[in-house]
Image (spheres, helix red, strand yellow):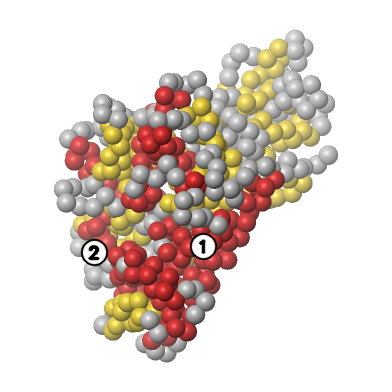
Amino acid sequence: MVKLGMDFGSTYTIVSVFREDTGVLEILSLGEGLPPNIPSVVARGKGETLIGFAAKNKTGKKGYTVYKAFKMLLAVTDPGKLAERGYDEENNPVEITRVFIEGVLSQVLESLHETRIDQLVVGVPEIWNNSLETLGGKATLRDICKGLDFVDPEGVKVVSEPAAASAYFAHNYYLITKKNFEGNILLVDYGGGTLDITLSQVTTSDRKDGVNSMELKVLERKGAGENEEGRVGEAGIVYMETVMDWAIRRSGLTDGEAPEYDGAFYRAVDDLEMELQTSMKKIQNVFEEYGLDYPEELNEEEFAEIEYGREEVSVSFGLLLEVYNEVIWGVFDRKMDEIMDYMDENGIDYMDGSRDDFKIALVGGFGNFYLVKWQIRDKFKLSHNDKRQENIIVDKAGCERAVSLGAALLAADVIGIRSTADFSIGMWAYDIDKRICMNYAIRYKQEIEVDTVYYARSSVDGEVFVIQAISGGFDKFLINLGSDDKLANFGLLKEKFAKKLSNVVTNQYHTAVVGFSVDPSNVVSVHVRDYDLMKGAISEEDHVVELTKFNDLFEVATVGPLPR
């Protein structure tokens, strides 16, 4: 059986497999001699469609349209924003993502001499859970992967990237110490499109023996990286784009104006990315020599010359620092403060470098950048022999590939995840006295089992709450993405989904109990059971209606306080 883990990244994608016969985790590539970091790029033109390395090489080439950052645009529906990134109705982010994932996985299968994937776990940013617009990204990816002919649809799971990476580090701890890890892992995942800072708790359960008894639960998350002003994120991509933007302006080639974000510009960004990746030691040496308090001296030190059009544009170390301070530093510092506040409030000791039950791991391609590492070392006062980073890292490459490796462990059920609700959900309806009732069935951060039905219950006696569907159906929901139960998003269902729920209550009294279940990709199903008002009995027949991702579900959604 083929069980794969995939880190579908904004800039690079990595696929891994856990060999159950040998217990070895292995990174896969698209072919012999190719590196495992597959560029998340699709190119179309001259009658062909290319992915990965071949597609990236077409950046700026005449006759080709190159698509990047499509992962972070999956939830965007504004045609103007999509057009700014080169997308149109036919070549939209969903279609380009499908083409890319199908191409990557089919080539991986060919390299394994296999024809079918039995289990596929894909990692997505934790920040996708922070808004109604992006919450549907997990469902979109799930549907794309389930629709591939060579993938078992029942074996597809979409999980948070930090949870997958934390599973990998917990696994490393077991391999190194021969003991299960018990404690907290603070994972800082800085990639091309998003920053995810996630606190997880790892405990030992009676699920299985040995390493397989570890289970991971996400306690808190903070992050950044939404689509803003036509750009993607507050992470690696926008950092590199801004460096080149400022460098070109200051070169005089555009008379101080912003350059066109065209093929020549993105080719220059690609070249800058390559310089950053291959010059990590050089960057470290220069910044350690000068420190971070002497920007004038750093401005005189050239980092690289990048070709833009037919000209060479100089990028100094001072510019690398200046853009970092402007674009990255404040966001990163604020989000770290937020997670520290949570740990302070919950009594988690995160500043003691002698503790073995609290670990800090920095992952993601942008997480390898010296200034990112410096900022987190300074924030947590990390020392050379700090136990907060011991026994979880096998090698530096593993940090960059932790999401993919952890996803492969989850696909093979080596480590389990205890699911907590990413949102509260309930029903706007009437009780049997025809009073408006607004009860949550699932509450934010409640520990839940996926595909298990949770019914709205009375806050007085805990019994299931009986509601009256005046028209025999429902068209309004309660959704709350935070911990304040007094606030909610009121969602009016779009017509096609309202029709699905228009006649589900069939008894003469129009009374029922309503429950909700959530699959691993945050796709919600509504469960309705008729309630016989005269007998006080709940029907055993369960009307189940699967809905869809949230950004396709609602016609309108407003935020307001729940009425008393």
Task: Report the front residue among 15 and 317.
Answer: 317
Q: Position of residue 281 (x, y in %)?
A: 34, 66
Q: Nearer the viewer, mark 2 or mark 1?
A: 1
Residue 192 x/y as whole percent: 42, 59
- Residue at (80%, 42%) from the top-left corner? 563
Count up the numbered dots.
Answer: 2
Q: Which of marks 2 and 1 is nearer the N terminus?
A: 2
Q: What is the quadrant of residue 318 in the picture?
A: bottom left
Q: How crowded is mark 2: few (under 14 residues within 10 Å), some or many (20 or more)?
A: some
Q: Is mark 1 on a helix, strand or loop?
A: helix
Q: Name the residue under label 1.
A: 375
Viewport quadrant of the N terminus: top left
What amino acid type is highlighted by mark number 1? Gln
Q: Quadrant of the C terminus?
A: top right
Residue 139 visible (yes or no): no
Query: Which residue of the protein is positioned furthest toward the top in this rendering?
Result: 535
Give the x, y percent position of residue 398.
Answer: 35, 47
Looking at the rendered structure, which numbered label has been put on residue 57? 2
